[in-house]
Amino acid sequence: MPVSNIRAAFPCEVERVWKIVTDLSDWSWRSDLSRIETAGDGQFIEYTTEGYPTTFTVTVMEPCRRWEFDMDNTNMHGHWTGTFVQNGANAEVSFTEDVTAKKLLLKPFVRTYLKKQQANYMRDLKKALERPVDP
């Protein structure tokens, strides 16, 4: 199982980062998604801009501290862990994905794909945090 981690610090309150990351009703900041559907029982489905679905099942939710979920689609399954910490004036996040490819042909590319996805996610998150805060 390839494991990939990305960390970042943002000059804001951790509550702001938490709200953006966990708000399933506003995915507009994500450049890779066309929509998110909530399915109840802690499940949600993200659809890529090409319409490809991935189902997520929340396993841990500790507000402003930790969010974890299992992931599954036709190409892979795995687990995502996000930690959120306030360190002085910065909100520090660490996102880890542990993924197994379901198709033999995809296995050599999983780690590179994860790194690319995580870098894109952090770019999108940084842009979202640069937007003005609603009063």
Image: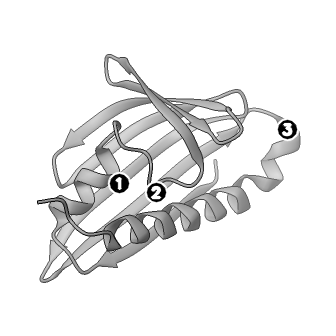
Q: Position of residue 11 (x, y in %)?
A: 24, 81
Residue 25 as seen in the image, left or right of residue 53: left
- Report crowding for label 3: few under 14, some 14 to 19, many 20 or more residues within 10 A (C-alpha): few
Dot 3 falls on a residue whose secondary structure is helix
The residue lying furthest to the top in this view is: 40
Q: Position of residue 5 (x, y in %)?
A: 50, 64
Disc with the residue nearer the chain's start (3 vs 2): 2
**Looking at the picture, which amino acid does disc 1 mark?**
Gly
**Looking at the image, residue 23 lies above or below residue 21:** above
Disc with the residue nearer the chain's start (1 vs 3): 1
Residue 105 as seen in the image, left or right of residue 18: right
- Report crowding for label 2: few under 14, some 14 to 19, many 20 or more residues within 10 A (C-alpha): some
Disc with the residue nearer the chain's start (2 vs 1): 1
Q: Are marks 2 and 1 in contact (CB under 8 Å)?
A: yes
**Looking at the picture, which amino acid does disc 2 mark?**
Thr
Q: Position of residue 6 (x, y in %)?
A: 48, 68
Dot 1 falls on a residue whose secondary structure is strand
User: Would you identify the image quadrant in which residue 126 lies?
Assistant: bottom left
**Looking at the image, residue 1 lies above or below residue 120:** above
Q: How far apart, in angstroms, are the residues tagged by discs 2 and 1?
A: 6 Å
Judging by the rendered image, the residue that carries numbered circle 1 is: 82
Q: Are marks 3 and 2 in contact (CB under 8 Å)?
A: no
Q: How far apart, in angstroms, are the residues tagged by discs 3 and 2?
A: 23 Å
Mark identifier at residue 104: 3
Q: Position of residue 45 (x, y in %)?
A: 50, 28
Labels 1, 3: front one = 1
Judging by the rendered image, the residue that carries numbered circle 2 is: 96
Which residue corresponds to the image point at 63% horizontal and 40% vertical from the top-left? Answer: 48
User: Would you identify the image quadrant in which residue 88 lies?
Assistant: bottom left
**Looking at the picture, which amino acid does disc 3 mark?**
Leu
